Amino acid sequence: MKKLEIGLATLYLGSCEDVIPHLSANEIQAVITDPPYGMKYDGGITDKFTQIKGDDAKDQELTNIYLNAFKLGKDKPLYIFGTWRTYAEVYNSFLQAKRALNAVIVWDKKGIGLGMQHHRPQHEFIFYSKANTWFGGKAESDIWVCPRETMGQYEHPTQKPIKLMERCVHNITEEGDTIFDPFMGSGTTGVAAVRKGRRFIGVEIDEKYFEVACERIRLAQEQLRLF
Ligand SMILES: C[S@@+](CC[C@H](N)C(=O)[O-])C[C@H]1O[C@@H](n2cnc3c(N)ncnc32)[C@H](O)[C@@H]1O
């Protein structure tokens, strides 16, 4: 396990299962995370990416991975990403963690993904569990339209748009709060967090993506200082 402090962010290289016991629930105000999808996804046609770690897990094994998202967030608001393929495992993780599922947001990516299916995917899910704090609008829709950037700009096969993560950050935290992402990948939650003046704790198991996250979060904070 390696720990690095970069301004508002504390980043860990290692498995979240090993890192979480070293953290305290009092340190964080919200969990926003995008765990592995159990799809053996490696970014499709490009050979730029390696297969995501933990992405070969299935059924209860995958649910157990998702349960890590709840360990520090028992009474905190949560956004957890998923797809229709992993709906059952994410739903089971809510049941097993005894957390209410208050909304399933459909993220409309405004364009179809790659693949040979009859119905190529244009959406993902964002599972939401509420707590006592809410900073979003009075009547938010559960359909969020946010185009993906082009794959060429991505450094991780399932990298999320910064604008999408900023919307999550805005809705459930205020300036100075700390957001926890146990599966940070290339660190998009962290980039969104620091751009919005939040503190961030992130964990990534794959050294390659950990380094990418460090660099993106460092850059995001440098850019804030310049403007
Ligand atoms: C779906 S990706 C997250 C992508 C991220 N939202 C982004 O924008 O780049 C999930 C990440 O979780 C990491 N991961 C898998 N198992 C893990 C574990 N036990 N602890 C920490 N990270 C893990 C994978 O290496 C992968 O990068």
Image (cartoon, rainbow, N blue to C red):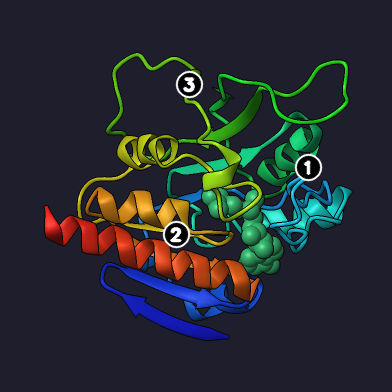
Q: Which residue is pictured at 30% across the width and 28% down the height?
A: 136
- Who comes first in sequence, dot 3 or dot 1? 1
Please say whether residue 77 is visible from this viewpoint.
yes
Q: Relative to 7, say whether 132 is above or below.
A: above
Q: Relative to 45, say whether 64 is above or below.
A: below
Q: Mark 2: which amino acid?
A: Phe
Q: Mark 2 and ligand 1: say if the CB distance to the nearest ligand atom is below 8 Å.
A: no
**Quarter where residue 51 is shown:** bottom right
- Who comes first in sequence, dot 2 or dot 3? 3
- According to the picture, the residue beneath numbered tag 2 turns out to be 180
Residue 144 numbered tag: 3
Residue 9: % across, % down? 34, 68
Residue 35: % across, % down? 65, 52
Could you tell whether 199 is left or right of 49 in the image? Answer: left
Dot 3: what SS?
strand
Label 2, residues with CA under 10 Å away: few <14, some 14-19, many ≥20: many
Q: Mark 3 and ligand 1: say if the CB distance to the nearest ligand atom is below 8 Å.
A: no
Mark nearest the camera among 2 and 3 is 3
Depth check: give the residue in front, 71 or 159.
Answer: 159
Q: Relative to 152, say whether 171 is above or below.
A: above
Q: Mark 1 and ligand 1: say if the CB distance to the nearest ligand atom is below 8 Å.
A: no
Mark nearest the camera among 3 and 1 is 3
- According to the picture, the residue beneath numbered tag 1 turns out to be 89
Depth check: give the residue in front, 203 or 96.
Answer: 203
Dot 2: what SS?
strand
